[in-house]
Image (cartoon, rainbow, N blue to C red):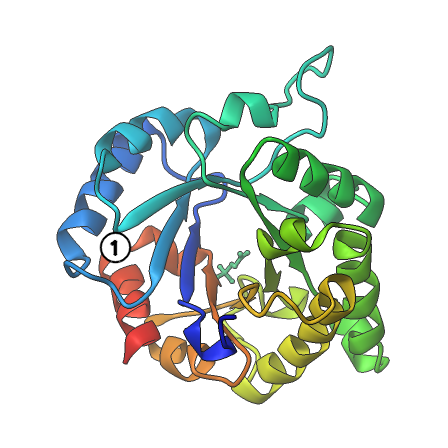
Amino acid sequence: MMTPEMRRPLVAGNWKMHEGVAEAEALVHSLLAGLPATPAAEVLVLPPFTALETVHRLIGSDTRLRLGAQNCHWETAGAFTGEISTTMLEPWCAYVLVGHSERRQLFGETDEIVRRKLDAVLAAGMRPILALGETGAERERGQTQAVLLRQARSGLVGLSVDQVSRCTIAYEPIWAIGTGVAATPADASEAAAVLRSVVDEAAGREQPTVRILYGGSVTAASAASLLHAPGVDGALVGGASLRAAEFCAIVAGAGA
Ligand code: PGA
């Protein structure tokens, strides 16, 4: 059985609605030039759908960089104008992010919808990254733990042990996303402990390999302390993932 110490960190770059094909191509070239031969972390990029094929081709057989999608629909096909299915993503992607707070807040995704998406990602043989986190108001009201428990249980309880083992959780406090104000390492650790308790609840303490990431205003300056906070196994990076040198420095921070 693996010990928690054996979890390899994951550093994921969420490009959001940035980078057309040409920009994506340039960014991936810079990343491949900037990453060391054997990065201390597994490194993942989540480009917009239109750049997936190009980025996939550029990565080729280079194992230093992996590819994921930012969102999916829960059905495999059908009359869902503007949506994309896991079947369509599977040729390109190893991971799919579900439940990002921008999806929850701006596009009305509920815990139930996020769970359907997570199930669809697992059914397609990819790995879901379940994003969750409290708002600033929930934090002020002392509801952080309750919100994390609700969102994590909704995402994981009822899955098989094998399915849980393929999940990654990203703790992203909403007040820290894109604000320049990251959580403290102590806050990230506290949240990771709550989320780890749900992993244990869902998988009977048999899945120490499930990684718990922190996301929200991660920069090269804050990465090392956040990535070494007890219980934190990596980072989900937004804005800083669009700057190759800074993203590579964050990856380096994971191993330092
Ligand atoms: P940020 O975004 O790093 O720009 O705060 C993180 C995210 O939304 O995943």
Whether residue 100 appears in this view of the structure is no
Residue 179 horizontal/vertical position (percent): 55, 67
CA neighbours of label 1 inside 10 A, class few (<14), some (14 to 19), many (20+): many
Whether residue 38 appears in this view of the structure is yes
Q: How many marks?
A: 1
Give whichever of 146, 95 is nearer the camera: 95
In the displayed structure, 105 sits above or below 53; it is: below
Q: Quadrant of residue 247?
A: bottom left
Q: Does the closest atom of ligand 1 sit within 8 Å of the Cβ of label 1?
A: no
Residue 38 horizontal/vertical position (percent): 19, 61
Q: Residue furthest front?
A: 1
In the displayed structure, 23 sits above or below 146; it is: above
Q: Residue furthest bottom?
A: 186
Residue 53 horizontal/vertical position (percent): 35, 25
The reply, left or right, for residue 52 in relation to residue 63 is right
Residue 111 horizontal/vertical position (percent): 81, 49
| Residue tagged 1 | 244
Give whichever of 150, 48 is nearer the camera: 150
Q: Quadrant of residue 40?
A: bottom left
State the residue at coordinates (49%, 84%): 229
Q: Amino acid at mark 1?
A: Ala
The reply, left or right, for residue 200 in relation to residue 184 is right
Local secondary structure at mark 1: helix
State the residue at coordinates (45%, 79%): 5
**Quarter in which the C terminus is drawn:** bottom left
